[in-house]
Image (cartoon, rainbow, N blue to C red):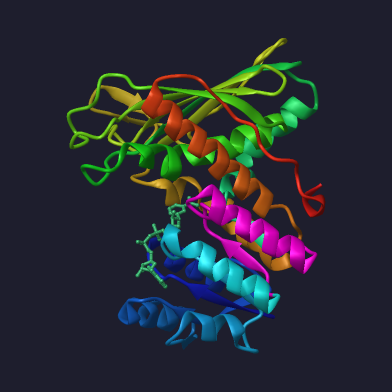
Amino acid sequence: MKRVGIIGTGIMGADHARLLTEAVSGAVVGGVFDLDADRAAGVAAASGGARVFEDPHELINDAEIDAVLIASSDATHEEFALACIEAGKPVLCEKPLAPTVEGCARILEAEDRFGARLITVGFMRRFDPGYNDLKRRLGEGAIGVPLMLHNVHRNPANAPGQPDAGLITNSAVHELDITRWILDEEIVEVAVHAPRKTSHGGGTQDPQLLILRTESGAISDVEVFVNARYGYEVRCELVGELGTVTLDSPRPTTLRRGGVTGRELPGDWRPRFAEAYRLELQDWVDGAGGGASAWDGFAATFVARACVAALASGERHEVSLPPVPKIYR
Ligand SMILES: NC(=O)c1ccc[n+]([C@@H]2O[C@H](COP(=O)([O-])OP(=O)(O)OC[C@H]3O[C@@H](n4cnc5c(N)ncnc54)[C@H](O)[C@@H]3O)[C@@H](O)[C@H]2O)c1
């Protein structure tokens, strides 16, 4: 039984703790730490009485903790990931691996020095049954050579005044990863268009339209709209030479009421990707290696940085990733 230590017991940390306790085999929550001690205590109690640590580094280095799940705020990921590598412990680090390219690079270097992969990055869409079906159909040749991927990523509402870059680094970063994963190639050029702003964003440039060109010349476009009001929705359509595959909101039932027929949408990402989070955790606990690597985390932050620059300049930006370190090949 693996004893998982969780750093950060906010929305994601609490959700992961619940899944580890109720829905994943082979692991228990062995310890938790959060700057908010009450929050940590609440999650510990709900996880069968896990130990509440007073210091994150004590948790990381404790002999009773076998693996660490980092679900604290973005800016803390690097410090904790580096400490886990130093301690030789496997990590599931929520996205982003680190908010800066330099921070991601330091983690890559540390893992390279350690000589084996320890880090998995929480790009859970790689475990979503719908995205997997889409990738399988592409792999089987059902739609021929892929030409375009159209993505839609909408949230009902966000805190007003979010920095413009946040739509890229917090939200569209999932599409940056899923584009690389579905098409199995790197993004080499980006442009970001800024349409008329919604009046519901408190001045934030919302929505945004990202245009990503890959090595083979395929285009992936991403509409990211975090104050779309009506619900949480992620969709995409992959267009190939022979046909298309569409990923729709996976709701098995259709509601008919008040003269309208349709599918209900969740209020946020947790119900939409509940199965993906569970499968991601199970894969990580099993050591199966199906998740995104530190290199994938680095690449996503690298492309996100180019998108942020492209948004500011209004120009296309080339993306030239450094060579892939040997341990990720
Ligand atoms: N994979 C996904 O779909 C997904 C979705 C949402 C958020 N995230 C990521 O998950 C992480 C957590 O997001 P959230 O929505 O749970 O945020 P949150 O604000 O609900 O929780 C963050 C927690 O981290 C704690 N924290 C902050 N600094 C800390 C430190 N130095 N040490 C320990 N704890 C600290 C805070 O007290 C808080 O409880 C973020 O990195 C976020 O980007 C991923």
Q: Position of residue 283 (x, y in %)?
A: 69, 59
Q: Is residue 22 above or below residue 58?
A: above
Q: Relative to 77, is 218 on the left or the right? A: right
Asked if residue 164 lies left or right of residue 178, the reply is left
Task: Residue at 44% x, 31% y: name it.
Answer: 309
In the rendered image, which quarter is residue 203 located in?
Answer: top left
The structure residue drawn at horizontal position 61% and vertical position 61%, both measured from the top left corner, is 281
Position of residue 249 relative to residue 259, above or below, is below
Q: Tell which of 259 and 221 is nearer to you.
A: 221
In the image, what residue occupies the spot 80% across and 54% down? 327
Q: How many marks?
A: 0
Name the residue: 76% across, 68% down: 114
Q: Does the magenta stretch include residue 81?
A: no
**Which range of residues does the magenta coloring cover?**
89-117
User: Can residue 250 be spotted in the picture?
Assistant: no
Looking at the rendering, in which quadrant would you find the N terminus?
A: bottom right
* 172 and 11: which is toward the camera: 172
Q: Nearer the viewer, residue 201 or 282?
A: 201
Residue 113 seen in render:
yes
| Percent coordinates x, y for residue 72 in the rendering | 44, 65
Residue 73 on image: x %, y %:
41, 62
Q: Quadrant of residue 82?
A: bottom right
Residue 141 picture quarter:
top right
